[in-house]
Amino acid sequence: MVVPTYRSQQWLFDVAAGRFDVDLAISGMEARSVQDLLPNMDPRCGYDIDRGAGPLRAAVASRYGVAAEQVLITHGAQEALYLLYAAILNAGDEVVVRSPGWQQTTDLPARFGATARTVAIAIAGGDRDGVSRTVQALSPATRMVVLNSPHNPTGLAWDAPQWASIAAAVDGRDVLVVNDEEYLTDESRSTLHIVPNSCTVTSLSKVYGFPGLRLGWVVGPAAVVEACVNYRRYTTISNSPLLESLGLAVLDRQGQYLADYHARLAAGWALFSEWLADHPQLEAIPPDGTPFALCRVLLPGQPSYELCLRLLAAERLLVMPGDVFGAPGYLRISYARPEPVLRDGLQRLSRVLRAVAG
């Protein structure tokens, strides 16, 4: 089958590449240097263990309070999700997903003969009935429910009672609940602890600022992890042992990285909120733990995608058009940026918004 064009990547790497000086599209912390981590790197460069090196798996397992057998280290969260689809889904299965969101979730199940049943997120109303509508979408053919909380691109998150409703809905059914927890910073609140036999995926990319390490993980039932390991043997085999040793060093310093992340979110949101008060052309959904906010464009006759093109052309400013996530009429704007970068970007955005508004 032909895989659909990956719209968000096409926007970043084809349409916008080389056309911006200020980036308010980034979906996590800016990339950090590994310089201070290099003394911790094991220089041996042989084949790694297919499920990830023991010390790194143990470090991840301890964060969730599970056995190491329930952890698989992957090439970022994207490979983690891919392996789950490949290992679990069969022809005729259904996958309940939510949109707007990460395109991989909606498009890839078909690659394995499954059908994606999409539940629309009611963005404007804060998706208050999102859980009930997700539960209603379950059918006898449902094999997997793939969710994302805190959510990209809306910034919305489900609380423990909402997750308990999902747990009750799948109780006694052969349904695997998977939550992409890329922006969750407290593993004690993981879906794993509320929905029995569920899976979580995440990585060191967004919160920690090390996307170049290409390290993520699946945590879930040992049998599910083992099925993913077996499929992986046919594809990437393993991670780089060099990068895994650096990843372990990142987790050893997680306290500082998390403190930096939360401080950046607090300072950035304060500045962004103050700026929004003077710009009625945009209406933001207050984010719940994400470094970006989804903003509705309140400019009649101004499509969001064309507005983003204008920002590139007039101000060399990069933001994400909601169109690439399935949310036309919105912009995803990263506010957790260093203050000089954020102020510069918002000034550029102001000039274009006011010019369009007339």
Image (tube, rainbow, N blue to C red):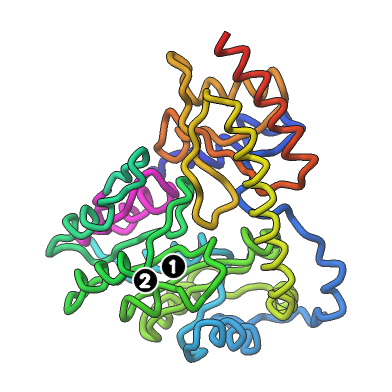
In magenta segment, residue 241? no
- Which amino acid, by three-letter code, is at mark 2? Ala
Image coordinates of residue 174 in percent, x first then y, are 21, 75
Amino acid type, residue under disc 1 in the picture: Leu
Q: Residues within 10 Å of mark 2 (few under 14, many from 20)?
A: some
Quarter assignment of residue 271? top right
Left or right of 237? Residue 231 is left
Q: Kindly identify the residue that appears in the image at 58 percent across and 26 percent down.
A: 279
The residue singled out by tag 1 in the image is: 83
* Circle 2: element type: helix
Per the image, is 102 magenta? yes
Q: Residue furthest top?
A: 358
Q: Position of residue 191 (x, y in %)?
A: 40, 72
Q: Is residue 257 above or below residue 20?
A: below
Gap between marks 2 and 1 measured at Cα = 6 Å
SS class, disc 1: helix
Image point 29% across, 66% down: which residue? 89
Total of numbered circles in the picture? 2
Q: How busy is the neighbourhood of tag 1: few (under 14 within 10 Å), some, or many (20 plus)?
A: many
Q: Position of residue 143 (x, y in %)?
A: 24, 67
- Is disc 2 in contact with disc 1, using a CB cutoff of under 8 Å? yes
Q: Position of residue 181 (x, y in %)?
A: 48, 65
Q: Which residue is mark 2?
A: 87
Q: Nearer the viewer, residue 22 or 256?
A: 256
Work out whether 190 lies above or below 53.
above
Q: Residue at x 54, y 39 (%)?
A: 332
Which label was assigned to residue 110? none
Direction from residue 5 to residue 38 in the image, left or right? right
Front residue of this view, candidates 119 and 86: 119
Q: Which residues are magenta?
A: 92-118
Q: At x 52% / y 89%, what residue is drawn?
A: 68
Please identify the quadrant where the C terminus is shown: top right
